[in-house]
Image (cartoon, rainbow, N blue to C red):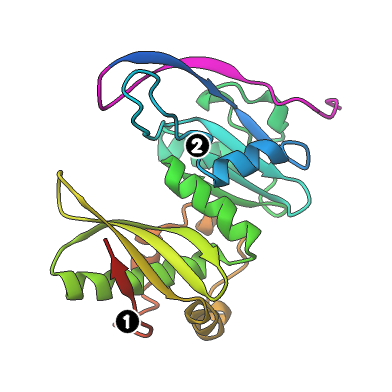
Amino acid sequence: MAKERTVPESVDLPVICPFCGREFDYTMYPVIKIPGDNRLKKQLLNKDLYFPTCPYCREQFKVKPNCVYFDARKAEMFIVTDASDKKIEEMVKTGDILPEDVRSPEDIPPFIGSLFRRRIVRDVDAFREKILLSDCSYDDRIMELVKLALSRLLQKDSGQHVYRIFLDQASGNMLTFAAVLGMRPPFENVEVRTEASIYTKYKNKYLHRIGDPREDRYIFTDQKWAEESGLLSGEDEGYIMPMK
Protein backbone atom coordinates (compact mmCIF):
# COMPACT_ATOMS: atom_id res chain seq x y z
CA MET A 1 0.00 0.00 0.00
CA ALA A 2 1.29 3.48 -0.89
CA LYS A 3 2.25 5.73 2.01
CA GLU A 4 0.04 8.70 2.81
CA ARG A 5 1.42 11.90 1.27
CA THR A 6 1.88 14.98 3.40
CA VAL A 7 3.48 17.18 0.72
CA PRO A 8 1.89 17.32 -2.76
CA GLU A 9 4.13 16.04 -5.55
CA SER A 10 4.50 18.58 -8.33
CA VAL A 11 6.08 19.17 -11.71
CA ASP A 12 7.19 22.41 -13.32
CA LEU A 13 6.03 22.70 -16.93
CA PRO A 14 6.43 25.48 -19.51
CA VAL A 15 3.29 27.51 -20.29
CA ILE A 16 2.83 30.26 -22.86
CA CYS A 17 0.96 33.45 -22.01
CA PRO A 18 -1.86 33.97 -24.54
CA PHE A 19 -1.55 37.74 -24.13
CA CYS A 20 2.14 38.43 -24.69
CA GLY A 21 3.35 35.08 -26.04
CA ARG A 22 6.16 34.74 -23.49
CA GLU A 23 6.96 31.35 -21.96
CA PHE A 24 7.55 30.63 -18.28
CA ASP A 25 7.51 27.61 -15.96
CA TYR A 26 4.42 26.91 -13.90
CA THR A 27 3.97 24.33 -11.14
CA MET A 28 1.40 21.61 -11.85
CA TYR A 29 0.05 19.02 -9.41
CA PRO A 30 -0.93 15.69 -11.02
CA VAL A 31 -2.98 14.70 -7.96
CA ILE A 32 -4.94 16.65 -5.37
CA LYS A 33 -5.85 14.23 -2.62
CA ILE A 34 -8.33 15.04 0.15
CA PRO A 35 -7.72 14.89 3.07
CA GLY A 36 -4.12 16.03 2.85
CA ASP A 37 -3.97 18.54 0.02
CA ASN A 38 -6.51 20.99 1.41
CA ARG A 39 -4.19 23.92 0.67
CA LEU A 40 -4.20 23.07 -3.03
CA LYS A 41 -7.97 22.68 -2.99
CA LYS A 42 -8.38 26.13 -1.44
CA GLN A 43 -5.99 27.64 -3.97
CA LEU A 44 -7.95 26.12 -6.83
CA LEU A 45 -11.29 27.36 -5.50
CA ASN A 46 -9.75 30.83 -5.02
CA LYS A 47 -8.34 30.73 -8.58
CA ASP A 48 -4.79 30.85 -7.28
CA LEU A 49 -3.97 27.43 -8.77
CA TYR A 50 -4.14 26.84 -12.54
CA PHE A 51 -4.98 30.52 -13.07
CA PRO A 52 -1.42 31.92 -13.38
CA THR A 53 -0.45 35.56 -13.72
CA CYS A 54 2.16 36.12 -16.40
CA PRO A 55 5.37 37.46 -14.82
CA TYR A 56 6.01 39.57 -17.91
CA CYS A 57 2.72 41.29 -18.81
CA ARG A 58 0.88 40.62 -15.48
CA GLU A 59 -2.21 39.26 -17.25
CA GLN A 60 -4.03 36.31 -15.66
CA PHE A 61 -5.10 33.34 -17.75
CA LYS A 62 -6.08 29.68 -17.41
CA VAL A 63 -3.87 26.66 -18.06
CA LYS A 64 -4.92 23.20 -19.20
CA PRO A 65 -3.77 20.83 -16.46
CA ASN A 66 -3.92 17.05 -16.36
CA CYS A 67 -5.02 16.55 -12.78
CA VAL A 68 -6.98 14.15 -10.60
CA TYR A 69 -8.92 15.38 -7.57
CA PHE A 70 -9.56 12.51 -5.17
CA ASP A 71 -11.69 12.83 -2.02
CA ALA A 72 -11.53 9.63 -0.01
CA ARG A 73 -14.15 10.78 2.50
CA LYS A 74 -16.77 11.50 -0.14
CA ALA A 75 -15.68 8.64 -2.43
CA GLU A 76 -15.46 10.89 -5.45
CA MET A 77 -12.89 11.65 -8.09
CA PHE A 78 -12.80 14.43 -10.69
CA ILE A 79 -10.42 14.37 -13.64
CA VAL A 80 -9.41 17.22 -15.90
CA THR A 81 -7.58 15.96 -18.99
CA ASP A 82 -7.20 16.41 -22.72
CA ALA A 83 -7.00 12.68 -23.40
CA SER A 84 -9.60 11.24 -25.78
CA ASP A 85 -13.08 10.58 -24.38
CA LYS A 86 -13.10 6.90 -25.32
CA LYS A 87 -9.65 6.19 -23.92
CA ILE A 88 -10.15 7.91 -20.60
CA GLU A 89 -13.69 6.61 -20.14
CA GLU A 90 -12.53 3.00 -20.43
CA MET A 91 -9.71 3.63 -17.96
CA VAL A 92 -12.09 5.19 -15.48
CA LYS A 93 -14.53 2.30 -15.65
CA THR A 94 -12.05 -0.50 -14.96
CA GLY A 95 -8.85 -1.34 -13.08
CA ASP A 96 -7.29 -0.68 -9.70
CA ILE A 97 -4.50 1.94 -9.95
CA LEU A 98 -3.87 4.24 -6.98
CA PRO A 99 -4.15 8.02 -7.43
CA GLU A 100 -0.49 8.36 -6.40
CA ASP A 101 0.51 6.60 -9.61
CA VAL A 102 -0.74 9.44 -11.83
CA ARG A 103 2.00 11.33 -13.66
CA SER A 104 0.49 11.96 -17.10
CA PRO A 105 -2.83 11.53 -18.99
CA GLU A 106 -1.75 7.96 -19.80
CA ASP A 107 -1.54 7.20 -16.08
CA ILE A 108 -4.96 8.55 -15.09
CA PRO A 109 -6.32 6.14 -12.51
CA PRO A 110 -9.18 3.79 -13.19
CA PHE A 111 -11.61 3.14 -10.38
CA ILE A 112 -14.13 0.55 -9.29
CA GLY A 113 -17.25 2.19 -10.67
CA SER A 114 -19.66 1.10 -7.98
CA LEU A 115 -17.62 2.78 -5.24
CA PHE A 116 -16.80 6.22 -6.63
CA ARG A 117 -18.61 9.18 -8.13
CA ARG A 118 -16.41 9.89 -11.14
CA ARG A 119 -16.43 12.88 -13.47
CA ILE A 120 -14.25 13.82 -16.44
CA VAL A 121 -13.95 17.42 -17.63
CA ARG A 122 -11.90 19.22 -20.28
CA ASP A 123 -10.94 22.54 -18.71
CA VAL A 124 -10.03 24.08 -15.38
CA ASP A 125 -13.30 26.06 -15.06
CA ALA A 126 -15.35 22.86 -15.16
CA PHE A 127 -12.83 21.14 -12.85
CA ARG A 128 -13.11 23.93 -10.29
CA GLU A 129 -16.90 23.89 -10.63
CA LYS A 130 -17.10 20.16 -9.78
CA ILE A 131 -15.11 20.74 -6.59
CA LEU A 132 -17.19 23.79 -5.67
CA LEU A 133 -20.43 21.85 -6.17
CA SER A 134 -19.13 19.02 -4.01
CA ASP A 135 -18.19 21.49 -1.27
CA CYS A 136 -21.72 22.90 -1.33
CA SER A 137 -23.33 19.42 -1.43
CA TYR A 138 -24.94 20.20 -4.79
CA ASP A 139 -25.69 17.39 -7.24
CA ASP A 140 -23.83 18.35 -10.41
CA ARG A 141 -26.52 16.81 -12.64
CA ILE A 142 -29.21 19.00 -11.12
CA MET A 143 -26.94 22.03 -11.44
CA GLU A 144 -26.38 21.26 -15.14
CA LEU A 145 -30.16 21.38 -15.60
CA VAL A 146 -30.29 24.72 -13.77
CA LYS A 147 -27.50 26.02 -16.01
CA LEU A 148 -29.31 24.86 -19.13
CA ALA A 149 -32.50 26.66 -18.08
CA LEU A 150 -30.53 29.80 -17.27
CA SER A 151 -28.73 29.59 -20.61
CA ARG A 152 -32.04 29.50 -22.44
CA LEU A 153 -33.33 32.50 -20.51
CA LEU A 154 -30.10 34.40 -21.02
CA GLN A 155 -30.05 33.63 -24.73
CA LYS A 156 -33.65 34.81 -25.05
CA ASP A 157 -32.91 37.98 -23.10
CA SER A 158 -29.62 38.87 -24.80
CA GLY A 159 -30.29 37.52 -28.27
CA GLN A 160 -26.86 35.88 -28.20
CA HIS A 161 -25.76 32.25 -28.19
CA VAL A 162 -24.51 31.03 -24.79
CA TYR A 163 -21.16 29.41 -25.54
CA ARG A 164 -20.34 28.41 -21.95
CA ILE A 165 -21.81 28.77 -18.49
CA PHE A 166 -20.46 27.53 -15.18
CA LEU A 167 -20.97 28.17 -11.47
CA ASP A 168 -18.44 30.69 -10.21
CA GLN A 169 -19.61 31.39 -6.65
CA ALA A 170 -22.16 30.04 -4.18
CA SER A 171 -22.73 32.27 -1.18
CA GLY A 172 -25.72 33.01 1.01
CA ASN A 173 -28.95 32.67 -0.91
CA MET A 174 -27.46 33.48 -4.33
CA LEU A 175 -25.70 31.49 -7.04
CA THR A 176 -23.36 33.40 -9.34
CA PHE A 177 -22.52 32.00 -12.76
CA ALA A 178 -20.00 33.09 -15.37
CA ALA A 179 -21.42 32.98 -18.89
CA VAL A 180 -19.63 33.35 -22.21
CA LEU A 181 -21.78 34.74 -25.01
CA GLY A 182 -21.23 34.47 -28.74
CA MET A 183 -20.65 31.89 -31.46
CA ARG A 184 -16.95 32.68 -31.95
CA PRO A 185 -14.28 35.09 -30.65
CA PRO A 186 -14.40 37.80 -29.53
CA PHE A 187 -16.76 36.51 -26.85
CA GLU A 188 -18.66 38.57 -24.29
CA ASN A 189 -18.34 37.59 -20.63
CA VAL A 190 -21.26 38.26 -18.30
CA GLU A 191 -22.12 37.48 -14.71
CA VAL A 192 -25.44 35.70 -14.14
CA ARG A 193 -27.09 35.45 -10.73
CA THR A 194 -30.13 33.57 -9.49
CA GLU A 195 -31.58 32.58 -6.13
CA ALA A 196 -30.12 29.40 -4.64
CA SER A 197 -33.68 28.20 -4.01
CA ILE A 198 -33.93 27.50 -7.75
CA TYR A 199 -31.53 24.59 -7.24
CA THR A 200 -33.82 23.12 -4.56
CA LYS A 201 -36.84 23.40 -6.86
CA TYR A 202 -35.03 21.59 -9.64
CA LYS A 203 -33.73 18.95 -7.24
CA ASN A 204 -37.22 18.24 -5.94
CA LYS A 205 -38.56 18.05 -9.47
CA TYR A 206 -35.87 16.01 -11.24
CA LEU A 207 -33.68 14.07 -8.80
CA HIS A 208 -36.06 11.11 -8.64
CA ARG A 209 -35.92 10.87 -12.43
CA ILE A 210 -32.18 10.29 -12.62
CA GLY A 211 -30.11 7.40 -11.32
CA ASP A 212 -27.24 6.81 -8.90
CA PRO A 213 -24.57 9.51 -9.49
CA ARG A 214 -21.88 6.79 -9.39
CA GLU A 215 -23.19 5.13 -12.56
CA ASP A 216 -20.96 5.12 -15.64
CA ARG A 217 -23.48 7.07 -17.70
CA TYR A 218 -22.82 10.18 -15.60
CA ILE A 219 -19.03 10.24 -16.05
CA PHE A 220 -19.41 13.09 -18.57
CA THR A 221 -21.98 15.25 -16.78
CA ASP A 222 -22.03 18.60 -18.57
CA GLN A 223 -24.31 20.82 -20.64
CA LYS A 224 -24.35 18.26 -23.45
CA TRP A 225 -25.64 15.68 -20.97
CA ALA A 226 -28.30 18.09 -19.70
CA GLU A 227 -29.46 18.84 -23.24
CA GLU A 228 -29.54 15.19 -24.30
CA SER A 229 -31.36 14.12 -21.13
CA GLY A 230 -34.50 15.83 -22.40
CA LEU A 231 -35.58 16.49 -18.82
CA LEU A 232 -36.33 20.18 -19.18
CA SER A 233 -38.70 19.96 -22.14
CA GLY A 234 -39.02 23.74 -22.45
CA GLU A 235 -38.55 24.41 -18.73
CA ASP A 236 -38.03 28.12 -18.01
CA GLU A 237 -38.55 28.24 -14.28
CA GLY A 238 -36.52 30.77 -12.30
CA TYR A 239 -35.09 34.13 -13.16
CA ILE A 240 -31.70 35.62 -13.88
CA MET A 241 -30.04 38.96 -13.28
CA PRO A 242 -27.26 39.36 -15.88
CA MET A 243 -24.49 41.77 -14.97
CA LYS A 244 -21.52 42.67 -17.17
- Judge whether residue 97 can be spotted in this image: no
Using a 10 Å C-alpha cutoff, classify the residue at mark 2 as few (fewer than 14 neighbours), some (14 to 19) or many (20 or more): many
Q: Vertical placement of 150 versus 135: above or below?
A: below
To which quarter of the image does residue 51 belong? top left
Q: Where is residue 131 in the image (x, y as percent from the top left)?
A: 58, 51
The residue depicted at 33 percent of the width and 76 percent of the height is 240
Q: Is mark 1 on a helix, strand or loop?
A: loop
Q: Vertical placement of 46 versus 147: above or below?
A: above
The residue depicted at 33 percent of the width and 30 percent of the height is 59
Q: Give the range drawn in magenta.
A: 1-21
Task: Return the disc, 2 or 1, that comes first in the chain's sequence.
Answer: 2
Q: What residue type is labelled 1?
A: Ser
Question: What secondary structure is the stretch in magenta mostly built from?
Answer: loop
Residue 233 is labelled as: 1
Task: State which quarter of the image contains the N terminus.
Answer: top right
Task: State which quarter of the image contains the C terminus.
Answer: bottom left
To which quarter of the image does residue 154 belong? bottom left
Q: Position of residue 205 (x, y in %)?
A: 51, 85
The residue depicted at 50 percent of the width and 30 percent of the height is 66
Residue 88 is labelled as: 2
**Is residue 39 found left or right of 59 in the rendered image?**
right
- Judge whether residue 49 can be spotted in this image: yes
Q: Does 14 appear in magenta?
A: yes
Q: Do the residues labelled 2 and 1 touch (CB within 8 Å)?
A: no
Q: How far apart are marks 2 and 1 (CA)?
A: 31 Å
Q: Position of residue 32 (x, y in %)?
A: 66, 35
